[in-house]
Amino acid sequence: MNTTLLRLVLGNFHNVLHFVLMSLLIGNSSALDSPVGVIERSANVILGNGTESATISCSLNTAAHTVNGNVWLRNGREMPDTEVNSSKHFMNYTVSNLMDAGVYTCVFKGPDQVNTTIIVQGPPVLSKHKRMYTSVYVGSKVQLHCVLGLHGFPPVSWSWMKLNGTAFDKIENQTHATVTRTDGHSVLLLHSVQLIDAGEYRCEARNSAGTAHFVQILRVHSMRAALWPFLAIVAEVLLLCSIIIGCEQLHKSRSEKQEELKEN
Amino acid sequence: MPQPQEPPDGGWGWVIVGATFLQFSLLFGVLRSMGVFFVEFSNHFGEPSGRVSWISSTSLFIHQFLSPLASAIANRFGARPVVIAGGILASTGFTCAYFAQELNHVFLSLGVVTGLGWALVFGPSVSTLSRYFDHRRTLALGVAFTGVGISSFAFSPLFQLLLDKYGLQGALLILAGIELNLCLCGMLLRPITLKEDLMQSKLKDKATGILQKLVQFFDLSLLTDRGFILYVLSISFTNFGYFIPIIHLVPHAKLLGHDSYSAAFLLSAASITDIFSRLLCGWLADRYKAQMLYIYVMWAMATGITITLIPVGTTYVSLLMISMFYDYLLELSVL
């Protein structure tokens, strides 16, 4: 008896949870905008990995509303090219590339304006740096940058990692490394670089539509390292110079002796 | 008192050829391959690359401009000490660049000091080489100048390797050591007294007053010789355009859409023909000494025609052929 009751409660709980979740989801997309069921909208789109374009559409269910035009909004701002003055109860828009990610709102204009939003998610894309490596000296301050070429939607979260052996270790904010994140730009700051900081650094920009990453190589040199070859070369030059001087003195003394012999 | 002699045309002369070969490779090879460092300089000092390119311009300018002064000093003190001093100066320039905190310091050290050192090295070595050879002079000069081609071929990857292993300042320090080898070459320039020296020393004692002394120091009496003036003018005009096509060849190719590796190879290919042409011209000029003037005019004209063909070359193969041909003719005319 207890188990069946438990099962019933659990089963119902699952159903209730499911219902609550679904209503939340649907409610998110059209809550506070219009009564549920007035506008039929196409599904949210996730761009990326082959899906570069999609068509989103809205259509009015009821004939009760009078429509004299429609327009699309992107991220809250009107797109004037999409403005149409017609009484059509259907509107669509083609999202043609990854740059078009964002929150789209379809608006049916008229005495009673109705609208609903469709989310078009897109992956971020990092802009490639010209240099793949940064060369610094021990003790100096280094900034490693990662810049978003394409912001994507929703906003990204950044993370920095350093290659350790075969795996990447996550870098947290420590005393000698700080990560700053601003809109579309993340900087890893190493205050005083040491030789162990050399290696590959990977920055990752992640959102629900995809991930972009970029690997940079940091090279750390010590100022003293070049001193030994330099001293070796100087020693070689001095040695060869002395050999040349020695040979010439020998040659000179020999030719002088020959001249003396000739004169005598 | 060493006996005055005829130019030996061999013997120790070939050692001098080897020494000048090394000198020119350390001088022009480094100068031409300096471009490898530019990006690092630009990043290290945070200056735009336009400013950084002034480094090689400054050193080249000082080198060329102070050449007459260097020759005059070598006339007075002898070639050997001047060249050794030049080597030490060039090395010091690089060492100062190692300690530089700003780009202006680099202009002073790598530009002025090293340029001065190179000026002191170049003129006296060429004149010493010329003194040791008479009949085979152009051949000897040609062989010595091949050092330029070989070293610009080899130094670019070497510099990149030094940059990767030691960083910018480490590479500069190692280059300072390498430039010190110029002193070594200076050591080998054994002075030689020729018969014509004895005649000149008789004229020297007549100078009085500072202006007269200056005139004699620089041997400005040369300027009254019409042939000399014409020759100088001709070489000056050639020099105006000399470096420009070579330096801009690679960016031009990149602009046309060729990838940077093939574009860099254009310069290497041009260096290869450079080497061959210098040897060929050296041999030719010695055999046909009487017609040297006509040969010179012919090659100079051909060089000019080749340059006008450069805009025509759009495919990679045609660019390659044109650049090789151009460098070949250029070196022939210069020599």
Image (spheres, rainbow, N blue to C red):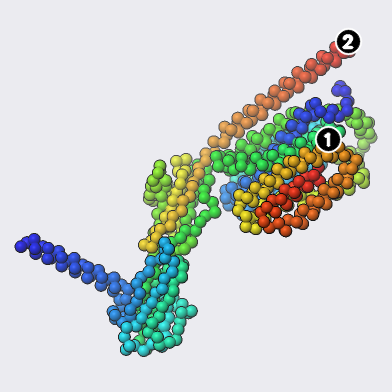
Dot in front, 1 or 2? 1
- Let me know if marks 1 and 2 both belong to one chain: no
In this rendering, the answer to whether B15 lies above or below B248 is above
Q: Quadrant of residue A49?
A: bottom left
Q: Quadrant of the N terminus of chain B?
A: top right
* x 39%, y 47%: residue: A168
Image coords of residue B202 (percent x, y): 94, 31
* x 25%, y 68%: residue: A21
In this view of the protein, which residue sits in the foreground, B95 or A204? A204
SS of the residue under disc 1: helix
In this view of the protein, which residue sits in the foreground, B105 or A245? A245
Compared across the picture, whether A203 is left or right of B217 comes to: left
Q: CA distance from mark 1 to mark 2?
A: 38 Å
Q: Quadrant of residue B194?
A: top right
Q: Quadrant of the C terminus of chain B?
A: top right
Residue B137, numbered circle: 1
Compared across the picture, whether B251 is left or right of A161 comes to: right
Is residue B108 visible to us here? no
Residue type at mark 1? Arg
What residue is pinned by disc 2?
A: A264
Image coords of residue A108 (percent x, y): 38, 83
* x 48%, y 61%: residue: A149
Residue A205, numbered circle: none
* x 43%, y 57%: residue: A212
Is the residue marked by circle 2 packed among few (<14), some (14-19), or many (20+) residues within 10 Å? few
Residue type at mark 2? Asn
Compared across the picture, whether A117 is left or right of B150 comes to: left
